[in-house]
């Protein structure tokens, strides 16, 4: 009996020690990463740093603009320039802002938009740029893209832990997401190590970044390179380039336009319905219009007969009262090799034309 009591006491002490350690670790992690103690000093060029820079820039812009504010969300393919769009504000009456970032997806945008517009009432319209209104699976499982954990880590709340972790398809990814939401230091470990190795350098970089990043990004001018001369023989499945085509242009054309057709499983439609659906649910009953636009598909459009798409989640959303699909062919005029810098992205001239067309199409929708 004494041995049993002694064992019970030891177990209780061990449990108490582990619990105390957990609480201490969680408290330190929360102090660093759930407050403004460390996050303002994130590496500006990291995925987390750029996501947070975008968030802070757009929060500031809300106080500088009126009620006719339009926010756009997309990845690097949403190649318009707010600066050029806003040159048309005297005619359109709208101010355009971009809260998207290269490499992000609807899962990232949900957390960005949730914190940018907590009352779901700040924007006149939220505009999403999508590659297609129909759902086409590729060989990438978008739900498995763990980059979201790094982009949105500062925006993730303790209450998001289980839900966010469950959004990944494998148990290893769920554990990584669960642990990262609970202890953000695991996700930011490399950032912290780099900071501690050269703190003065990081502080100087952050200060320079804070002094000019908003203006640098707003005044950005796209690359003038083009794919002029590109031709694709779809029968031979071969691309012909101009003599001046660079390696990036050749690789992106071969990997994007000449990509093999993936089996159509429906998983991309499921991903879209989940994350776009959550954002649309937040704006149910709001004055904010949700607008989907189909981006210019590329310098050369892949034949429609290559793949039989089984669903159209974006078209389904149009049945909701405040959701509108832009004219599917509004940006077809941009689908020319001379307006793209590679197989994915518009060049300087393409971005300029797209900016004007975007203002025109969004204005048309909002005036209906």
Image: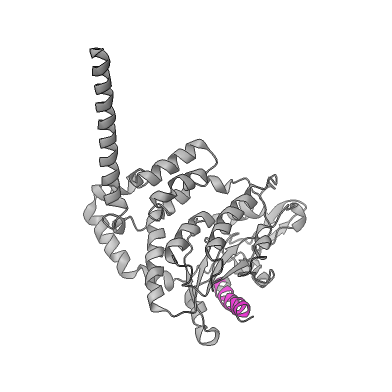
Q: Is residue 246 visible?
A: no
Q: Residue furthest front?
A: 1
Residue 337's x, y, as percent? 64, 66
Residue 150's x, y, as percent? 42, 50
Picture quadrant where residue 263 is located: top right
Q: Quadrant of the C terminus?
A: bottom right
Q: Nearer the viewer, residue 242 or 304?
A: 304
Residue at image location 70% in from the left, 52% down from the top: 238
Q: Which secondary structure class fits the magenta region best?
A: helix
Picture quadrant where residue 190 is located: top left
Is 96 drawn above or below residue 317 in the view shown?
below
Residue at image location 49% in from the left, 82% down from the top: 87
Residue at image location 39% in from the left, 44% down from the top: 180
Q: Nearer the viewer, residue 151 or 349?
A: 151
In the figure, is residue 38 to the left or right of 51?
left
Residue 248's x, y, as percent? 55, 55
In the figure, is residue 316 to the left or right of 109?
right
Residue 350's x, y, as percent? 58, 71
Colour scheme of the picture:
one colour
Is 281 drawn above or below residue 86 in the view shown?
above
Q: Quadrant of the N terminus?
A: top left
Residue span colored magenta: 351-366
């Amino acid at each position: 009996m004494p041995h049993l009591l002694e064992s019970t006491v030891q177990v209780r002490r061990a449990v108490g020690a582990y619990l105390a350690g957990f609480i201490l670790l969680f408290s330190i992690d929360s102090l660093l990463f759930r407050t403004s103690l460390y996050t303002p000093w994130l590496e500006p060029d990291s995925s987390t740093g750029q996501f947070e820079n975008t968030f802070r820039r757009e929060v500031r812009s809300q106080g500088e603009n009126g009620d006719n504010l339009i926010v756009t969300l997309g990845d690097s393919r949403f190649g318009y320039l707010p600066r050029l769009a806003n040159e048309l504000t005297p005619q359109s009456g709208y101010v355009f802002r971009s809260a998207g970032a290269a490499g992000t997806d609807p899962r990232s945008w949900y957390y960005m938009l949730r914190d940018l517009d907590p009352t779901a009432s700040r924007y006149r319209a939220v505009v999403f740029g999508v590659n297609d209104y129909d759902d086409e699976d590729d060989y990438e499982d978008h739900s498995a893209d763990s980059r979201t954990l790094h982009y949105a880590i500062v925006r993730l709340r303790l209450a998001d832990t289980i839900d966010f972790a469950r959004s990944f398809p494998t148990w290893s990814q769920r554990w990584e997401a669960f642990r990262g939401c609970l202890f953000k230091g695991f996700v930011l470990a490399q950032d912290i190590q780099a900071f501690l190795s050269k703190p003065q350098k990081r502080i100087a970089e952050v200060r320079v970044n804070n002094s000019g990043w908003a203006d640098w990004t707003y005044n950005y001018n796209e690359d003038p390179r083009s794919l002029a001369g590109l031709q694709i023989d779809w029968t031979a499945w071969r691309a012909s380039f101009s003599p001046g085509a660079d390696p990036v242009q050749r690789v992106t054309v071969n990997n994007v336009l000449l990509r093999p057709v993936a089996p159509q499983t429906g998983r991309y439609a499921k991903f879209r319905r989940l994350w776009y659906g959550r954002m649309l649910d937040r704006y149910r009953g709001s004055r904010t219009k949700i607008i989907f636009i189909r981006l210019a598909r590329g310098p050369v459009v892949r034949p429609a007969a290559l793949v039989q798409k089984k669903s159209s989640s974006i078209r389904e959303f149009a049945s909701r009262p405040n959701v509108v699909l832009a004219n599917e062919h509004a940006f077809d005029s941009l689908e020319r090799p001379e307006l793209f810098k590679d197989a994915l992205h518009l060049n300087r001239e393409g971005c300029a034309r797209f900016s004007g067309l975007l203002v025109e199409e969004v204005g048309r929708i909002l005036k209906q």
